[in-house]
Image (tube, rainbow, N blue to C red):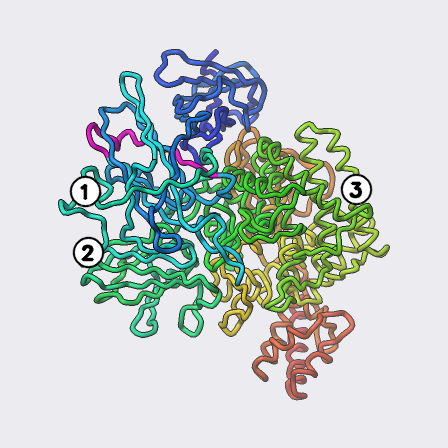
Amino acid sequence: MSGRTGARVVRIDLESPRPGDPVSVAEPRLGWRVEADDPAWRQAFAELSWELGSATTTAMARVEGEGRLGVAWPFAPLAPRDRGRLRVRVAGEDGATGDWSAPVAVAAGFLGAGEWIAAWIGHPAPERHAQPVVLRHEFDCGAVVRATLYASAVGVAQLAVNGVDVDDQVLKPGWTPFATRTVHDTTDVTTLVRPGANCLSIRLAGAWATEHFGFRQNAQPRYGGQPRAAAQLLLEFADGTSRWIATSGDWRAATGPLLESGLYAGERFDARSALVDAAGRDCAEPGYDDTGWPGARVLPAEAVPGARISPPVRRIEQLAAVAQLPGEDGATILDFGQNLVGRLRIRVSGPAGTTVTLRHAEVLEDGRLGTRPLRRASATDHYTLAGSGEEEWEPEFTFHGFRYAEVSGWPGELRSGDVVAVVVHSELERTGWFETSHPLLQRLHDNVVWSLRGNFLSVPTDCPQRDERLGWTGDIQVFAPTAGFLYDVRGFLDSWLRDLALEQDDDGLVPFVVPNVIGLARPAAAWGDAAVVVPDELQRRFGDLATLERQYPSARAWVELCLRLAGPARVWEGDFQFGDWLDPTAPPERPGQAMTATGLVATACLARSVRLLARAARLLGRDGDADDYDGIAEEVRRAFVREYVTPAGRMLSDTPTAYALGLAFDLLPGALRAAAGSRLAELVRENGYRIATGFVGTPLVLDALTATGHEAAAARLLLQTACPSWLYPVTMGATTIWERWDSMLPDGTINPGDMTSFNHYALGAVADWMHRELAGLTILEAGHRRVRLAPHPLPGIDDAAVAFESPFGRIELGWRRDGGLIVVTATIPLGVEAELALPGAPAGAPRVVGAGRHRWTCSAPDPVRPGTVGLDSSLAQLADDPEALDLVEQLLEAHRPGAVAAMRAATRWTRGQTLAELVFQYASPTVQREIGHRLDALSVARERAARERAA
C-alpha cells in the first residue's frame, strides 16, 4: 500500500546544537514534521531507516502511535565518529504508507571513554595577565580518508590546519564553569589535511577564563591568569590504521600580533608583529621557521571536555553606519542605527606604525560617547598598521555592546564602508514572529528581539557592554517564555542549566549568576527559581522531558532549601532578597528598595516553584513526589493569603506587583480575584497608567489585568509613552530594551545610577504577553500539540499577528479591525488541535479546530466613548479620558514649561480629587479658566457627535 497516502515527512529534527551539527550523545532524541493533503490525517505509526557508514545493510525501526516529538533513538547507540543517514516515513490510520523522507546526515561528535589524551598547553613565559599566544605543531602523514579534530580551551581559541581556519565559529568553545565542565568542538578537517607536511595551529586568548569578574574591589580572575588549550586530531587511513596528533610539550609557542585581549578592555593588535618568516611563510603554514620559538608550557589537566550542546557563536550579519558625526580632537563618531553586540571590521591603508583606535558606546550624551555606564570596561580596540597596502582587521576574541563607535587616528579620509559593525551571538534558529501596524509596539517587539540576540552569547547574560555580562538567573527566569517563542533555545538553555546544577552547593543554593564568578551568593526568590522555571518552560515549549528529568534533582534541591528557610509557617521572609528589583520608585543607587514587601514576593515565588516542581514530578512519573509537593504548594498558597491578603482582597503591600503576583500565580481564593483585579486596575489608573512594577511584577501585570477583565486598563498601560513605560524608551530612540525604565532621562542625559544598561532583556518579558494575549496564541499541551486561539483586540490597536514554527509545523494567528468587525485568521499544521475563543464569544465549552487555514469574523467591541468633562471632573475620570488629559497638559506646558512633568510625578489620579484642585497648583487663574473653557467646548463637541451617531 506504499505511496497511497498524501502524508510526507518534510523535516527531521535531531538532538544537536543546530540542524546539521554533530550530535553530542550516543542516543539522540528525534522528531519529524509531517504534511498531508487531508487535514484530518492522523499518524498510525512511523518507520525509520538507518544506514550506518558505507554499510550495505540498513537497520529499520517502527514507532507506533502518533508520537513524533522527542522520540527515543530506536537503533543501537552511536559510537564515536559514527556517521550515517536517517530517513523517516509515516503511515496513516488507514494503513497507507507515505514515501521516505530525504535522508538526514547524522554524525557522532562525542569521544569515547578514555579517548581524551590531549595535554593542556599555554604560553611558556607570559609577561602579562591573560597574554594571547599562538601555538603550532607540524606533522607528516600520508593520504587520509578522514581527519577529525577535537579542540577545547579554558579561554577562547581558533584552530587552523595548514593556514586555513577549521570553521567560522568565534569565541569558542564558549563559557562554562571551567573548573567543573569544559566543552570540545568536533570538526571534520579531512579536506584540509594533505599528504606530506602539515601544520596544526591555535590562536588563543583569555576572554571569560581570565577576565576580572566581580564588583569594585572584589573583581578578580576566577579561572586563573592565563588561557590554555587542548586539541587532538585523529587521522584515519585507507588501510584501517589511525593516528592521534595531540597537544603536548612538543608544541611551539610565541606571542603574535595580538598583544592584549579582554572582554571588557578590548584588543590591541600590532600588524607589524605578524609571525612571518624570512621565506614569507605564515606561522600557520607548514615549513615555517619556528626555531626561535620556545616549547609550549604543559599545564595541569582540566575537566575532561564533553561534546558541544549549545549552538556555537558566529558572525550573524553586518551593518553599515547610517551616519557620521564629528567627535573630539578630529575623531569621527559612527552611528550604526542599532544597538548591537559584536565588533567592528575595518579596511584601512596608511603608513606603518599608524594606530587606529575604536571606542564603543550604546548612546551619545551631549554629542559624545556615553561611556560612564561601561564602568571599568574600556571597550576600546587598537589596530597598528603594517603599512602593507590595504589592510583588513576585526578583533577576534572580544565583543562590545554598542550603537556608536568613535574612530580616531584614521589615516586619510574615512569613507563609507571602511568600517562595518559585525553582529555576533549564539546562532539560534528563529521560531517566532510578531507583527502589528502600531509602529511603537512593533519597535518595542523588535527591541526585545535585538536584546535577546545581544545577550544570548554563549550564556544568557544580563547586559553585553559594561564590566558585567553575567548569567543572572533572575533575568532568564522571567524572560524564558519570551525566548522560547522567539528562538529554538533548547540546546542553549539545556547547556546553561547543566552549569546551574554544577554551581549549586550541597544545600541546593542557586547562585545569583551562572557560571558563578562573583563569589558570595544567598538564596534569592525569583532568581534561584530559574532552577525550576526554565526546565519547565523548555518542557512546555518543546516537549523536552529529558532536560526536565535531568534537572529535577537541581530543582528539588532548590525548592527544599526555600522550604527550610520558610519554616513550618510556609512564609519566606526576613532573609536577603532582591525583591521587585528596579521598581521605578527605587532610588538610582538603591535598585532593590521597592514598594512591595520582599517577604510577599518571596512567598509568592515559593508557592509557584513548589507547584511547578509538583508538575515536573507528575510528568516524570514520580507520583509520590507530585502528591507531596501539590500538598505543600497549597500550604504555601494558604500561608500567602493568611499573611498578606485581607478578607476583603486587599494586599498588605498595596502595590501593582503584589496584586499581579496573587493573580498571575493563582494564589488568591476565587471569591477574592475580582476584588483584587479591580484594585489592581485602580492602582494602575492612580499611577496615570505608568509602570509601577520592577523585575518581578512587570512580566505579570498585564496578565493579571486581562485575566480579570480589565482590558482597557491593560491597553492604556501598554500604550503609555510617558516615563516610566514600555514605550517611553521607544520614543527616546531605543533600539533595544533598557535595564531601567529611565536609563536615559527625558532631557537626554544618562541616568545617574551606577547600574545603567541600554541592552537588558528582562523588562522585555512583556513580549510573552503580546504573543499569548494580544495576538492570542497560548500553549495548552507540550510542544504546541494543543493550543488556544484567543485574540484580544485591545482599544488603540488595529491588528496583531504571530507566527510560530512549532515542532509540528508553522502556526499562524492574526486579527485585524475591518470597520465594525474583527477578522481573525489562523493556520494550523497537521498534528495540532486548537481551542478557539473569538473576541466577545460567550463562556462555555471551547470550539476545537484542526489543521488547515481558517477565517472567522465577529463584531468589534463597542468603543468606550468619554462623556462630558470639566474642572469638576475627578482625576480618575481625567486619567481615563486621554483626549481631555492631553488638552490639559498642552495648556499647562504652554503656560509653564516643566509643569506637566512635575504634575505627573506628584499626582495620584484618584476619584476623590477634582481637576480644579489639581490645576490650581500649576496654573494661574487665567490658565485655569482657559482649561475650563476648552474642556466645556470639548464636551459640547462630544454631545453633538453623539446626537449625530444616534441619528
| Mark 1 vs mark 2, CA separation in Å | 26 Å
What distance separates the C-alpha of mark 3 from that of mark 2?
70 Å
Q: Disc 1, disc 2: CB below 8 Å?
A: no
Task: Look at label 2 and name its amino acid.
Answer: Glu
Which residue corresponds to the image point at 53% horizontal and 51% vertical from the top-left? 517
User: Which one is earlier in the sequence, the residue at label 1 or at label 2?
Assistant: 1
Question: What numbered label is drawn on residue 208?
Answer: none
Tell me the residue that label 2 is attached to: 390
Residue under label 1, please give it. 289
- Up-down: is 115 above or below 384? above
Question: Cβ–Cβ below 8 Å for labels 3 and 2?
Answer: no
Q: Would you say 580 lies left or right of 498 here?
A: right
Of callouts 1 and 3, the N-terminal one: 1
Residue 661 can be seen in this image:
yes
Q: Name the residue under label 3.
A: 634
Q: Position of residue 4 (x, y in %)?
A: 47, 16
**Which residues fall within the magenta stretch?**
182-198
Verify whether residue 184 appears in magenta.
yes
Q: What element carries label 1?
A: loop
Q: How many labels does the image show?
A: 3
Residue 871 picture location, percent across and down? 71, 78
Residue mark closest to the camera, 1 vs 2: 1
